[in-house]
Amino acid sequence: MAGLGRALFERTTRETLDFCLRELAAPDGGFCSSLDADSEGVEGRFYVWTAAALREELGELAPGAIEYFGASEHGNFEGSNVLEARGRQPAAREEIRARLLAARARRTRPRLTTSASPPGTR
């Protein structure tokens, strides 16, 4: 893989592994197999965003983020948006990502499953 393709592959791999470490790590050092879909009794609440919430969290960066993620007022999941890279990547992608992760960290987290892979088994 050369050039941009390799860079995108590396970034995607790094961000996926960061997700596993951030979201699925068990206190004993293993990894939980999944997250509950519900948070605060609402399916997907931890992960979805309304266009209004994106504007509130991102301010001047919101238009580029909304375009990039293909977010809309009506959403793509029960009135909210599951964010997916769909448009032109904004120059401030890393800042947008950091702000959204910080905002999401203030939300009620979904539960982890109780079954986990013991350290060193995978």
Image (tube, rainbow, N blue to C red):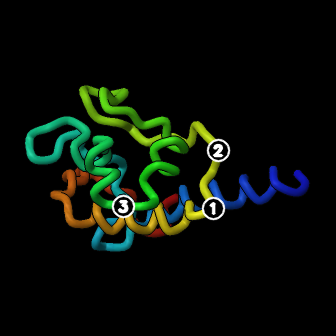
Residue sitting at x 16%, y 46%: 39
Q: How far separated are the C-alphas under marks 3 and 2?
A: 19 Å
Earlier in the chain: of badge 3 and badge 2, it is: 3
Residue sitting at x 28%, y 72%: 27
Evaluate if marks 1 and 3 touch, with contact meaning CB atoms under 8 Å apart: no
Along the horizontal axis of the image, is 108 left or right of 24?
left
Q: Nearer the viewer, residue 32 or 47?
A: 47
Earlier in the chain: of badge 1 and badge 3, it is: 3
- Mark 2 — residue? 88
Q: Which mark is residue 59?
A: 3
Dot 1 alpha-carbon crowd within 10 angstroms: few under 14, some 14 to 19, many 20 or more: few
Q: Quadrant of residue 59?
A: bottom left
Q: How far separated are the C-alphas under marks 1 and 3?
A: 15 Å
Identity, as a three-letter code, of the amino acid under mark 2? Arg
Dot 3 alpha-carbon crowd within 10 angstroms: few under 14, some 14 to 19, many 20 or more: few
Q: Which mark is residue 91?
A: 1
